[in-house]
Amino acid sequence: MSERAIHRPHAEWTFSGARRRVSAMLLRHIYILRSSWPRILEITYWPMMQMIIWGFLSTFLHGQSSYVAQAFGVLLAGVMLWDVLFRGQLGFAISFLEEMWARNLANIYVSPLRPFEHVASLIAMSILRAVIGLTPASVLAIFLFHFSIYDLGLPLLAFFFNLMMLSWAVGLLSVALLMRYGLGAESLIWFLIFLLAPICAVYYPVTVLPDWLEPIAMAVPATSVFEGMRIVLFEQRFDMHLFWRAFLLNIVYLAAGAGIFVAALKDARRRGRLFQVGE
Amino acid sequence: MHRGGWPKSPDPGSIAPCMSNTVIEVQQLTKRFGPVTAVEGLDFRIGAGDTVGLLGGNGAGKTTTIAMLLGLLLPSSGSITVFGEDLLKHRYRVLPRMNFSSPYVDLPKRLSPRENLDVFARLYEIPDRKARIAELARDLDIASFLNRPMQTLSAGQKTRVSLAKAMINRPELLLLDEPTASLDPDTADWIRHYLETYKRQSGATILLASHNMVEVERLATRVMMMRSGRIVDDGSPADLLVRYGRQNLEEVFLDIARNRKAAQQAAQ
């Protein structure tokens, strides 16, 4: 054993140090994904199944419904963009859950990794998992149904970015629930996002909703994204107003999510839930 | 005043033999979980290079104390200073200088020891990661299974990997919670030898929570006895044996755990 003096990282926060620590956490999750094909399958399986089912439904409705006839891809685009939101939130929360399953949270929170750096790594993982999950589905849609989500062009990036932001906000809430209620809250993270599904206007215009529900629906950033998506598909134009509305609402949601996360982390440290994770 | 008239918690100003360079200073540390008081009014200092055993039965408050010293658990009241920094305010100034190992905490099972150590080497910003991992693999005899998934390792092998993770940053302060729990005597002896060597070579400070008396007697230069969340005695192993009139620490432990009056009188 040779215990010579060792270089200590800066006690004060530096960007380069944070980048290295976030990369370390990313690497940890990539190691996990690389070692487990069921995890990769789980990420890609549902988006592909959803796309196939909605693709055939669109094919059927194309000859039956003027709504689908006007823009064949309206349902498929909805499915795929909804999956951006769902996979983004799931990728965020599951990457945290991996630490709970592994009983590794204490190791992480005793290391120099700051909580916000941990969140940054969860954000990066949510993007990675969403891309891994949706790329095969989008390619399959091109071959099976001759519909390319990429034909949306640059607006697709705007939709993707806004939906990811909302997924991080809901992801922060999911993680807060996991910290507060332990693994007993695991099932919550699988359906939490579906609370938003009926009012997000994924497959139908927001005007379909009852009058009293419309303002509530429009307070959800995703609703503006899906409305914007339909405008691109039906009218071939990008509605900047809807984009900014979604973006600014996302800032509010993210701020709320961050506040809830910080409060939950403090509560977890008060209750000792970082050390002994359980139900 | 301790319940049953046990010896008082030593005055933080007069307790430990090596006080010139204090690494940990704890004052009136208390932790309550609702109506349950897990730790109450702890006062102690640990000097640089000391190996201190935290002894006590189940529920005595050892793990709670370690969790608070790591900053994983917020105290209900009291203060913790580590390396001269207030742990509650400046935790990230001291975390790079310390590390820990506990049977309540695992490393990801699907990753290999090499992958796990690589991740933690990056988190601690170790400059030459490969060399450090190779060094630990040699020192802790984990080289032969460095690339196998953790889930395929025996309990003893996993413990050695956890210890390697705890050593990855060459900690100046090492907190160990039952480091040889559930290990066979040979592996446990091996781990103790490693810790002795590490301490001798690095001059690190070690706080060791255990209810293994042999381990504490062998490793610790000082023992703090806990019962019902309080420190009921504190001293070198030799001092405690004399004070309680016993042959070994196990007998002292039983006296304290069972609140034996004879021991109390002997201690007085």
Image: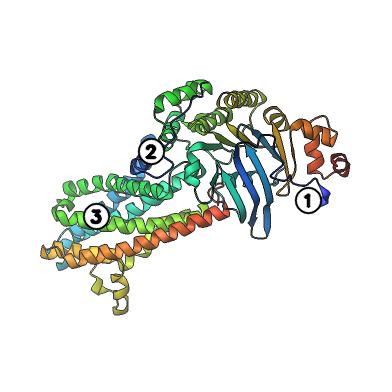
**In the rendering, which numbered label is found on residue A160?**
3
Does A180 sit left or right of A205 as displayed? right
Identified at 48% across, 27% down, the residue is A5
Protein chain holding label 1: B
Q: Mark 2 points at which residue?
A: A24
Give the camera-side residue of A38 and B242.
Answer: B242
Residues marked 3 and 2 touching at CB (< 8 Å): no
Residue B214, image quadrant: top right
The residue furthest front is B20
The residue closer to the viewer here, A23 or A192, is: A23
Compared to B119, does A271 lie above or below? Answer: below
Q: Residue furthest left?
A: A236
Q: Where is residue B10 in the image (x, y as percent from the top left)?
A: 74, 44
Q: Can residue A168 be seen in this view?
A: yes
Kindly identify the amino acid type of the residue bearing the numbered disc 3.
Phe
Residue B218 vertical placement versus A268 (above, below): above
Q: Given this view, does label 3 or label 2 mark the residue nearer the observer?
A: 2
Instruction: Give the label, 2 or 1, closer to the camera.
Output: 1
For the image, the number of numbered tags is 3
Distance in Å between CA atoms under marks 2 and 1: 47 Å
Q: Is A149 situated left or right of B88 in this image? A: left
On the image, numbered disc 1 is attached to which residue?
B2
Residue at 39% over, 45% down: A13
State the CA–CA distance, disc 3 to disc 2. 26 Å
Distance in Å between CA atoms under marks 1 and 3: 63 Å
